[in-house]
């Protein structure tokens, strides 16, 4: 009569059953129950250690298996499991010792031989790997995993002729190994052997694999072979089957980023980030795409995360600097570039980028020093030579700047940025005939953000008259549109039939001012077929066509804009109520929010108070945005009272602001859209230029006049001058303008 099975043995068998069925948590719990009763049971110690390793906790399994080996050092299986745990923990030498002990105890332990082969394979020790896999097959001829590993070794060692038939045979007899062959193909692809990966992909045709995985593999091969369109097609097919395939999302988004399809890449990157929020590649790609889309505020947290997670890599700091610069956070941008340079001092473009920012900050000496740092490492670096030329231009050292631009263009005739900068410098010098051909390169220059508005129409070659209706489409800012619109009458006089596509807010003003042409909004509603358009040019090209040289400005119109008369008269009546006839209404604007140069263009409203010290001058705000705080601060500091009309919102209606300006007597402003409006309306306008970095080319580089606007007077700072000096220089010009305006006011009653 047999005795009852002890409870611990029954528990051990239950644990083994759970283990064999893959229920690792349940098995581990039961093994622990057994060990609580029989702490020295070597089978339970061994098996719980094995289960913990299989459950992803090798560090927890190690002491159990070590205990099993101590209790019974001559069991080959224990040594083999110990080796597997050591390998999982990254301790290859200990794994090697344990596996070797396993085969020394039992030379027929096929699994231990196979594991020794895997260690050798991972170290690219191909001969040793072959020896161990063959030993495993000698011990167990039906050991398919060892057959596969031997074939995989031959494949990785470059012996494709031996490996391919073996893999084909393995798949024929054990099709369940298709995923392992797929992984081998991925490894070939990662090793940049796309031909090998393609052979394996062809071998896998007809075997049971997830369709999405097949498409992803084909997509990766196409990428490696430069077939971007085929890669995109494969990735889209994979995502149609599995929209959450992370590898495919990453691959397709990279393909889209490579061809600058940033908007299309964004939803893929957002989906990938949602699936893998800690994937730094996705974080980096999101930041990159957002910056290219101009969404700098959204990009910033991603780039800050990259810099925080990878503080010892220069790339994240450089990317972060770029966004800070676009947000006009120049100090933060400079700090980030300096961190990147400290991490990679031989990366020359970082010095060039930092030099541009130092120039924007106004520290031209520091900017020049960074250029020389870059040129010391790469004497021909176009960006550094170009920045140095820009610095000479800001210092009005035009001969030195010309020489540098010429040197860059001699080496790089198609350097669009240098062409554009040279053109702008010559435009500032009023060397129009020499400037316009270089300025035409602006569309290809770095940092040019104006979208192409050509709508696929042929480019007009400039010969008169155009072959049909000519579309002139806006570029740059509202002020530039107003400036270039002064050339429309001369072009229309040649008999050209013109359609001008402009900022929607300018449409009523331009339609009233230029009744001889058609004005439309430059947006998605513009239909070239409906408008019967034959050709196109950007508005900025009119300079070279209509004002080819200084002499051609003889026909430049004065006061060519026409404000809405009823609103103008109503506003003037309201503003002049209770004023004496000799009192003057003076429009004032003081701040620009342009990210590139707004800081250099702007003044504090209080700085302008001395110009209103003469009695009878009544300030009216032409400033866009929230102005109440600026006005209150200026009044508290200087006593200056500025009228703000809530009825007029320059950001919403430029036509309303044109009527407001036309209701005034004169204007004093920085370089902003209000300056162009006032000048285009023919109103006497004083433009203050407090910093050379904010001086746009049409204001010139010296003197008080510009050929573009007859009613404008200019007062400019010299480098390093305090604002008070600028205002002192402006005072006599302003007094003359005020006196003339009083005479007109009195004469008009």
Image (cartoon, helix red, strand yellow):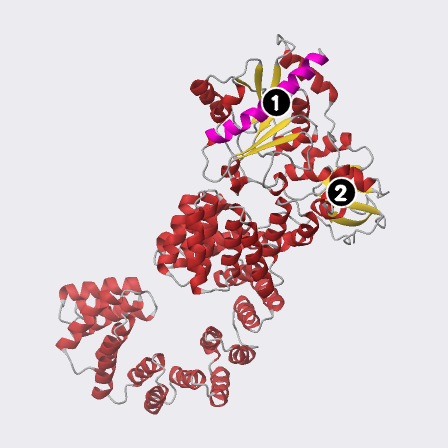
Q: Which of pointers 1 and 2 indicates the residue nearer the eye?
A: 1
How much space separates mark 1 and mark 2, taking CA atoms?
Answer: 29 Å
Kindly indicate the quadrant of the structure image that contains residue 705.
top right
Residue 457: image location, x then y, percent: 77, 52
**Residue holding disc 1:** 736
Q: Residue 744: say if magenta.
A: yes
Q: In this view, does 275 lie to the left or right of 681?
A: left
Quadrant where the image shows the N terminus: bottom left
Q: Residues within 10 Å of mark 2 (few under 14, many from 20)?
A: few
Residue 589: image location, x then y, percent: 56, 28
Quadrant where the image shows the C terminus: top right
Question: What span is in magenta?
Answer: 724-748
Residue at 37 percent across and 90 percent down: it is 141
Q: Residue 657: say if magenta.
A: no
Give the number of the disc on residue 552. Answer: 2
Residue 179 vs 465, above or below: the answer is: below
Residue at 50 percent across and 89 percent down: it is 161
Kindly indicate the quadrant of the structure image that contains residue 61.
bottom left
Residue 310: image location, x then y, percent: 36, 57
Kindly indicate the quadrant of the structure image that contains residue 543.
top right
């Amino acid at each position: 009569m047999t005795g009852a099975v002890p409870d611990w043995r029954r528990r051990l068998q239950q644990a083994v059953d759970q283990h064999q069925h893959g229920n690792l948590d349940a098995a581990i719990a039961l093994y622990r129950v057994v060990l609580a009763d029989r702490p020295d049971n070597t089978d339970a110690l061994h098996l719980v250690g094995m289960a913990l390793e299989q459950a992803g906790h090798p560090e927890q399994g190690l002491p159990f298996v070590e205990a099993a080996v101590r209790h019974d050092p001559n069991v080959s299986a224990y040594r083999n499991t110990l080796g597997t745990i050591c390998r999982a923990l990254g301790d290859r030498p200990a794994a090697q010792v344990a596996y070797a002990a396993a085969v020394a105890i039992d030379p027929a332990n096929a699994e231990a031989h196979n594991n020794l082969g895997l260690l050798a394979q991972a170290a690219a020790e191909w001969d040793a790997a072959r020896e161990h896999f063959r030993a495993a097959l000698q011990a167990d001829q039906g050991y398919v995993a060892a057959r596969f590993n031997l074939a995989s070794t031959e494949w990785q060692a470059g012996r494709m002729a031996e490996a391919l038939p073996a893999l084909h045979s393995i798949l024929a007899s054990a099709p369940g190994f298709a995923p392992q062959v797929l992984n081998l193909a991925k490894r070939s692809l990662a090793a940049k052997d796309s031909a090998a990966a393609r052979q394996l992909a062809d071998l896998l045709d007809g075997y049971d694999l997830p369709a999405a995985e097949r498409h992803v593999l084909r997509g990766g091969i196409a990428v490696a072979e430069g077939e971007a369109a085929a890669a995109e097609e494969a990735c889209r097919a994979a995502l149609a089957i599995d929209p959450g395939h992370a590898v495919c999302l990453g691959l397709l988004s990279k393909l889209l980023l490579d061809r600058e399809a940033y908007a299309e890449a964004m939803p893929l990157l957002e989906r990938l980030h949602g699936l893998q929020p800690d994937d730094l590649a996705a974080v980096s790609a999101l930041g990159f795409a957002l910056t290219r889309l101009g969404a700098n505020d959204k990009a910033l947290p991603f780039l800050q995360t990259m810099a925080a997670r990878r503080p010892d890599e220069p790339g994240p700091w450089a990317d972060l600097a770029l966004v800070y610069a676009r947000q006009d956070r120049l100090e933060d941008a400079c700090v980030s570039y300096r961190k990147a340079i400290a991490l990679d001092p031989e990366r020359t473009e970082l010095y060039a980028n930092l030099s541009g920012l130092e120039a924007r900050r106004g520290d031209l000496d520091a900017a020049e020093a960074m250029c020389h740092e870059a040129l010391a490492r790469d004497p021909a670096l176009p960006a550094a030579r170009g920045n140095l030329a820009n610095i000479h231009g800001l210092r009005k050292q035009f001969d030195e700047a010309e020489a540098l631009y010429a040197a860059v263009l001699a080496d790089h005739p198609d350097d669009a940025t240098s062409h554009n900068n040279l053109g702008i410098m010559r435009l500032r010098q009023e060397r129009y005939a020499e400037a316009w051909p270089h300025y035409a390169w602006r569309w290809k220059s770095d940092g040019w953000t104006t979208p192409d508005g050509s709508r696929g129409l042929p480019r007009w070659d400039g010969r008169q008259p155009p072959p049909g209706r000519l579309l002139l489409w806006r570029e740059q800012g509202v002020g530039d549109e107003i400036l270039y619109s002064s050339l429309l009458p001369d072009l229309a006089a040649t008999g050209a039939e013109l359609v001008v596509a402009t900022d929607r807010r300018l449409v009523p003003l331009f339609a009233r001012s230029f009744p001889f042409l058609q004005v439309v909004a430059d947006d998605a509603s513009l239909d070239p077929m409906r408008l019967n358009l034959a050709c196109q040019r950007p508005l900025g090209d009119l300079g070279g066509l209509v004002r080819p040289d200084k002499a051609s400005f003889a026909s430049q119109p004065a006061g060519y804009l026409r404000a809405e008369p009823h609103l103008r008269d109503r506003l003037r009546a309201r503003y002049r109520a209770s004023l004496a006839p000799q009192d003057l209404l003076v429009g004032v604007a003081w701040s620009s929010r342009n990210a590139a140069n707004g800081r250099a263009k702007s003044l504090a409203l209080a700085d302008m108070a001395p110009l209103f010290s003469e009695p009878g001058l009544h300030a009216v705000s032409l400033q866009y945005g929230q102005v109440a705080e600026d006005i209150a601060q200026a009044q508290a500091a200087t006593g200056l009272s500025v009228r703000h009309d809530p009825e007029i919102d320059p950001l919403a209606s430029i036509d309303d602001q044109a009527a407001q300006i036309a209701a005034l007597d004169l204007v004093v402003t920085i370089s902003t859209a209000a300056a162009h409006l006032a000048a285009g309306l023919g109103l006497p306008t004083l433009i203050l230029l407090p910093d050379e970095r904010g001086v746009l080319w049409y204001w010139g580089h010296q003197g008080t006049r510009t050929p573009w606007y007859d009613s404008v007077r200019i007062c400019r700072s010299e480098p390093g001058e305090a604002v008070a000096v600028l205002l002192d220089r402006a005072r006599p010009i302003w007094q003359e303008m005020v006196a003339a305006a009083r005479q007109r006011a009195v004469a008009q009653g």
